[in-house]
Image (spheres, grey):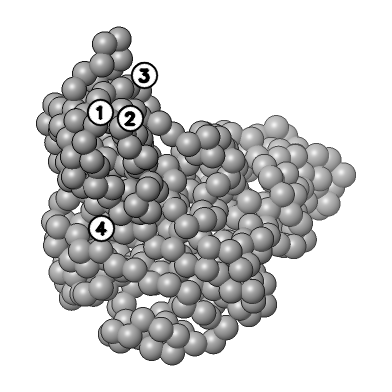
Amino acid sequence: MQLAPANLVHETSTSTGNGNLSTSAVNGKQRISDAYGTGSTPNIFNYFISNRAAAEWERGTGHMSAVGTLVRDTVKEGTNGTSAVTFSAGTKDITVDVPAAEQVVYTLRNRLTNGSFWVNQRQLSSVGDDAYCYDRWYALTQTASIGVTFQHTIQNGWARAIRLTQSQASAQRFGLAQIIETRDCWDLRGSPVTLSGMAQCSASTTLRYAILEWTGTNDTVTSDVVNSWTNGTFTAGNFFNSTSLTVTATGSIALTANTPTAITELTATLGSSLGNVIVMFWTDSVQAQNVTLDLGMIQLEKGTVATNFEFRPYALEERLCYRFFWRMVAGGNNYVGIAQCYSTTQAVGFIGLPVTMFGVNPTGSKSAASDFITFSAAGGDTTLTALTFSAGSGNAMRYDLTVASGLVAGNATILRGGNSNATLDFSADL
């Protein structure tokens, strides 16, 4: 999860034991509570504690419940492993330190794309089972469609979340999943990985999550991984499908209503036969109408410890999403491309794609042919009666347009949006 930065933070403590530490200010340094505030939200900052009088140290994440009271929420390593050190007498230095390995920015450490949920090209208000919604993420539902929107600034450090709403009158289970392309996960064969993130639900419930391996043909994945929503055994052939699917690890956390919660980190070692990695989150029990589930800061990374959530620049995250889906918003009078007329009613052109898209042949679609116009030989606007796509590659798509009349074979024409509804979608999602 994302931990906020601050300047030269240092306090000391003479507390003993493995519980909370009472802290005191250090001249010339910022107090932890001044940098990060106080409250009950866990895992706000990184800390490092070292006892001057003994060979005792500890690194983890924590929060200040009050000025001068450090709560050690998650111990990551120390002289007592990943358990809280029972400190003996002596002065302890407490600093806010981040290991060098976690200070490298924009490393693509997070193997998931759009784990922050900022990119939302489709702009859907509802989504059905096994269908994409926010870029790279697809919904899974027990019986019918759910609502999809977003939330901003759930708490300090958690800036954006996808919100799934159980919109049906009949209660149902629902969730969200992402498939990682083979090229972006093959190097993880035989390696440990850790899944982390933030969640919030409007009702008290148990959230489940899983790390799955697709062992069939690379990048030809059965995306609906659920065999039986009512089966409480979370293994292949029971809750999950059994064909070419390995259930590497599952986890769960009890969510208190309307309380932002860091999920319990899930660590697993991937097998040597994986073709793709899939992560999934879902509600353990059926949820009543209008129950909402917020997910954000979702990260899957190599290693046995969850590091700070990797916030990538929006422009970079967006381009990573373009590899699988790109929506061109033509709008009113925005130019799409130049075409060559080959009759009085037809023309052919191509659209260059913003990145090399996944696979050999992305698919193209449009809002409606009548949303687009082209120039006639007389210089006026002519509304399209048909617009089709074919002969695509990873870099461009051919389009054929049809109008009632007005074109001249051999001339060029320009395709553009005719109204605010005009959009073109190019998809290569797994």
Label 2 or label 1, whichever comes before in sequence order: 2
User: Residue flagged by tag 3: what amino acid is it?
Assistant: Leu
Query: Tags 2 and 1 in contact by the CB under 8 Å rule?
Result: yes
**Relative depth, front residue between 141 and 297:** 297
Which mark identifies residue 91? Answer: 1
**Relative depth, front residue between 112 and 40:** 40
Which mark identifies residue 52? Answer: 2
Write down the residue under mark 3: 8
Is residue 62 visible to us here? yes
CA gap between label 2 and label 1 equals 6 Å
CA gap between label 3 and label 4 equals 37 Å
Dot 4, how many residues are within 10 Å of its Cα: few (below 14), some (14-19), or many (20+)? many
Dot 1, how many residues are within 10 Å of its Cα: few (below 14), some (14-19), or many (20+)? some
212 to the left or right of 284? right
Dot 2, how many residues are within 10 Å of its Cα: few (below 14), some (14-19), or many (20+)? few
User: Residue flagged by tag 2: what amino acid is it?
Assistant: Arg
Which mark identifies residue 293? Answer: 4
Label 3 or label 4, whichever comes before in sequence order: 3
User: Residue flagged by tag 4: what amino acid is it?
Assistant: Leu
